Amino acid sequence: MPLLDVKDLSVTFARRGQRTVRAVDGVSFSVEAGQVVGLVGESGCGKSVTSLALMGLLPKQRGVTVGGSAIFADDTDLLKTDERTMRDIRGRDVAMIFQDPLSSLNPVVPIGVQVTEVLTRHRGMTGDAARKEATDLLNKVGIPDPTRRLKEYPHQLSGGMRQRALIAMAVACKPRLLIADEPTTALDVTIQAQILELLRGLVRESGTALIMITHDLGVVAGICDTVNVLYAGRVVESARRKPLFAEPRHPYTHGLLGSVPRLDSGRGEKLHAIRGSVRDVLPWPDGCAFAPRCDRQVDACVGEPPALVEGIHRHAYRCVNPEPATAEVSS
Amino acid sequence: MIRFIVRRLLQLIPTLFGLSILLFTWLHRLPGGPETAILGERGTPELRAQIRANLGLDEPILVQYGRFMQRMLKLDLGTSISTKREVTTEFIERFPGTVELTVMAMIIAIGVGIPLGYLAARRRGSFLDSASVGGSLIGICVPVFFLAYVLKAIFSEQLHLFPSSGRQDPTLGATRITNFFVLDGLMTREWDAALDALWHLVLPGIALASIPLAIIVRITRASVLEVLSEDYVRTAKSKGLTESTIRGRHILRNAMLPIVTVIGLLTGGLLSGAVLTETVFAFSGIGAFLKDAISNLDYPVLMGFIMIIAVVYLLVNLLVDVSYSLIDPRVRVR
């Protein structure tokens, strides 16, 4: 059994006087212990909403509906657990790292308190014991001079340091599942690599599973074992990392890969861009949402939504006219 | 921090100097004068001139100002024209009443306003939210003297729960030390006197609290709503922290800055006297006395009282600035 089994997750936002938005639409994927799973897509494809739904952090108000199931550790459905129990799970079993490290840290509370409060809440540590553990944690995530840093406030730390501090808080209770929502987006390129290296090291060391949410295929290539590509709230392609990069079947994935600049491409060669924008979407019930932007569009794309087809090595794609398979690739 | 406070205190001097010039020229340009109050309408021009000369009001304004400054530097505020008593004495007798009333009103306004504003923000769109927003609008609109009369009629004259006037029951014969009646009662261990003085503060305190309360509810609600959408609140939730930790450490602490500013301004305002409330409850603070001084153009009282009130106001502001840096480490005081 996988550590986390997400089945048919859907999230809709309904507002009076406005069209109901289906931000996540029947998303299924699973995460094994110690595995790194990528959720990839452009802004607005539903990847962040997915992570918030799993954490139970979507706003609890009328109009927000969450459907499906997310079985964690064989017995707990994260989508149906009451708030009290979720509070115990959050930060202890499932932890999260957010995108913008500056705004994600409380500006008026010292770093030390923000680290120790998790230890106090879930591990009952207080005083010197908590302080010592916090020092060790900062050390572990590569923050130099941790004793001094604990007393400092977020604005006194550099961007990379802040993200390290957030990671320290997330791994403080050795969670079994870590969700990282674009953890490197707000950082310099050199720092990005360091943070990814840190995450990879932590995962390898502790056996924590990691859901990596990103729009950056470089991040995917660097860290993920399996990848789910999302478009307009649905998984359009899912595969292990190597086959996905070697042989993307969905035109959207193909386009994403084609739009990454490469050092080995010819001088003056134009970058391949995907036409249109995320807003040019066909509602899924009326056909493939990507059809309006797709170069391989055929008549069959419109009418009914394409089904998820599973190919060899659990490489699945949702397309009636997929990119041709060029070579046999082993995963 | 100490250097910051000292420098701010030194900055008070030019501010007060400028204020004294403005105040002095404005007051002496007002039509009429203390002689009208003393003589009424019947005084002959000769008598009026005689009185003005006695008070030194016939001299050039610069000379008058010079004499005022001379006294001020010796911390002598002069003698009231209408009561013939020292301005300092009048102030020391009356200001403690105003301070007690202000403290009472602000305790009510803060104690009710912040929790109410917080809850309204957390349950945005609920009945409680609409009720507190609507209620605060009423609180701002209802005239204070009207509310004061209603409170007095119901809780004092009908239900006899609270006294209707004064600062303390004179038949208790309480000992006076500081003129802060509650404090005096505690210091002399005359518990009944302290309690009685406290009891006298309740109704005027509520009446005076109405507008500050309404303002604090609104500013708290707005500030908390803003903080609620911040990423660090989401981070706090993602750590599985308890509701009380999230509320105190992550929401309220960040929401406090604008609230503290407003509390400072409101406190400063209340400390300059509450004429209407004091009049309705026959409460002897500086408000009613200042009002009389204005209609009599009692120059020494006006100058003295307003200068001291200005100092108090500026000190409250300094306190607000200092508390900023205690709340938010990003606000550096230098």
Image (cartoon, grey):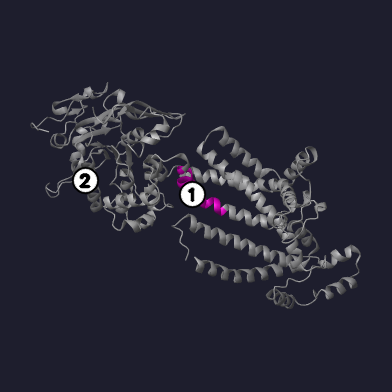
Residue B69 forms part of the magenta stretch = no
Asked which quadrant contains residue A80, the reply is top left
* Circles 1 and 2: CB atoms closer than 8 Å: no
**Chain letter of disc 2 in the image:** A
For the point 18% across and 26% down, the residue is A321
Front in this rendered view, residue A90 or A225: A90
Q: Are marks 1 and 2 on the same chain?
A: no
Residue that label 2 marks: A201
Q: Is residue B29 visible?
A: no
Q: Is residue B60 visible?
A: yes
Front in this rendered view, residue B35 or B240: B240
Which structural element holds mark 2? Answer: helix
Judge depth for marks 1 and 2 and give the one in front.
Answer: 2
Magenta-highlighted stretch: main secondary structure? helix
Residue that label 1 marks: B253
Write down the region rendered in magenta.
Answer: B245-261
Q: In the displayed structure, would residue A76 be above or below residue B37?
A: above
Give residue B321's position: percent from left, percent from top: 53, 60
Asked which quadrant contains residue B150, the reply is top right
Check disc 2 and give the amino acid type: Gly
Front in this rendered view, residue A2 or A57: A2
Q: In the displayed structure, would residue B87 be above or below residue A129?
A: below
Report the label total.
2
For the point 45% across and 46% down, the residue is B250
Residue B247 forms part of the magenta stretch = yes
For the point 40% across and 36% down, the residue is A87
Check disc 1 and give the amino acid type: Arg
